[in-house]
């Protein structure tokens, strides 16, 4: 293993330890949480080093940037690539044919297009529905900060659930940026309650997965029920170039 992979492995194992501690602190099994290492805005060498360090799940924000790394690192077929960033619907095909899972399903329009391309490629895509539980206008996701309005989501979610080539597995959120990890807790709790609400509305769907928590607040997220945490800088260091959704 080269120095880069060793240094990433040290932080990866440290993060896994923290996740285990947070899970145990609330009586959860550490195995119930998957750690997605976010390699957006990192060169392919960093993604490769993360895989050598033991990463099983890698997260990317931009379809083309991610697809290029996925192609280059094809030989590591055991690794799962997760799309975690906003996907413009014209990029749906790139996502369908390259990624293993989409956390950031944030509109019916995107869902319909992704479903179509998954159908054409003869595959079935696990997806999470992204919700904006903090009410910030800049954030993507179905607006869900107002709990009294959750029933207004039902029709559209029902249309997403009916798409034959998508398998909805749970929910995802990105809370407002806070000054301390605790600041995120109420948002994570809200996403968990939303999961209960949707489970009651759609008893035939298992919304088992909750994707929440980044470098700054993943332990709090695990305490509040995260099954997927998305950690970038705490493991692979500062992002190395500016990315843009081209
Ligand atoms: C960049 C990003 C992350 C990782 O953030 P870090 O602060 O680097 O851990 C997680 N989730 C999403 C949606 C992101 O865009």
Image (spheres, rainbow, N blue to C red):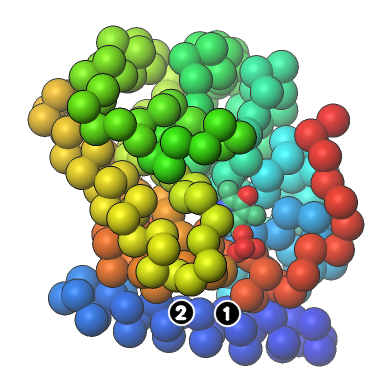
Point out the image quarter for the C terminus.
top right
Residue 12 in the figure: left or right of residue 202: right
Q: Quadrant of residue 181?
A: bottom left
At x 34%, y 61%, the residue is 185
At x 69%, y 81%, the residue is 8
At x 68%, y 23%, the residue is 88
Name the one closer to the observer, 226 or 148. 148
Q: Which SS class for mark 1?
A: helix
Q: Which mark is residue 16?
A: 2
Q: Which mark is residue 74?
A: none
Q: Is residue 190 visible?
A: yes
The spot of residue 37 in percent (x, y) is 60, 64
Is label 2 in contact with label 1 (beta carbons under 8 Å)?
A: yes
Q: Which SS class for mark 2?
A: helix
Residue 241 in the figure: left or right of residue 232: right
Task: Establish if 61 lies above or below 57.
Answer: above
Q: Is residue 122 visible?
A: no
Spatial separation of the CA atoms under disc 2 and disc 1: 6 Å
Ligand 1 positioned in quadrant = bottom right
Residue 150 in the figure: left or right of residue 41: left
**According to the image, label 1 marks what residue?**
12
Few, some or many residues within 10 Å of mark 2 (<14, 14–19, 20+): some
Name the one closer to the observer, 209 or 222. 222
Task: Establish if 130 lies above or below 230.
Answer: above
Task: Establish if 189 lies above or below 19.
Answer: above
The spot of residue 23 in percent (x, y) is 28, 75
The spot of residue 148 in percent (x, y) is 21, 27
The spot of residue 138 in percent (x, y) is 61, 35
Few, some or many residues within 10 Å of mark 1 (<14, 14–19, 20+): many
């Amino acid at each position: 293993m080269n120095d880069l992979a060793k240094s990433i492995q040290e932080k990866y194992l440290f993060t896994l330890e923290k996740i285990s501690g947070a899970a145990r602190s609330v009586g959860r099994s550490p195995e119930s949480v998957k750690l997605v290492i976010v390699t957006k805005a990192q060169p392919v060498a960093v993604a490769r080093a993360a895989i050598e360090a033991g990463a099983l799940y890698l997260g990317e924000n931009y379809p083309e940037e991610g697809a290029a790394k996925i192609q280059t690192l094809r030989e590591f077929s055991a690794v799962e690539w997760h799309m975690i960033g906003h996907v413009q619907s014209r990029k749906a095909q790139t996502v369908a044919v390259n990624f293993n899972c989409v956390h950031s399903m944030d509109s019916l329009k995107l869902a319909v297009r992704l479903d179509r391309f998954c159908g054409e490629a003869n595959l079935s895509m696990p997806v999470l529905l992204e919700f904006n539980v903090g009410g910030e206008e800049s954030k993507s996701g179905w607006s869900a900060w107002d709990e009294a309005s959750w029933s207004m989501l039902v029709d559209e979610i029902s249309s997403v659930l009916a798409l034959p080539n998508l398998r909805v597995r749970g929910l995802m959120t990105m809370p407002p940026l806070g000054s301390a990890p605790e600041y995120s807790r109420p948002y994570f709790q809200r996403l968990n309650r939303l999961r209960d609400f949707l489970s009651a509305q759609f008893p035939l769907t298992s919304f088992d997965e909750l994707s929440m928590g980044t470098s700054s607040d993943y332990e709090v997220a695990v305490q509040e029920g995260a099954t997927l945490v998305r950690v970038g800088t705490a493991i692979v260091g500062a992002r190395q170039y500016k990315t843009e959704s081209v």
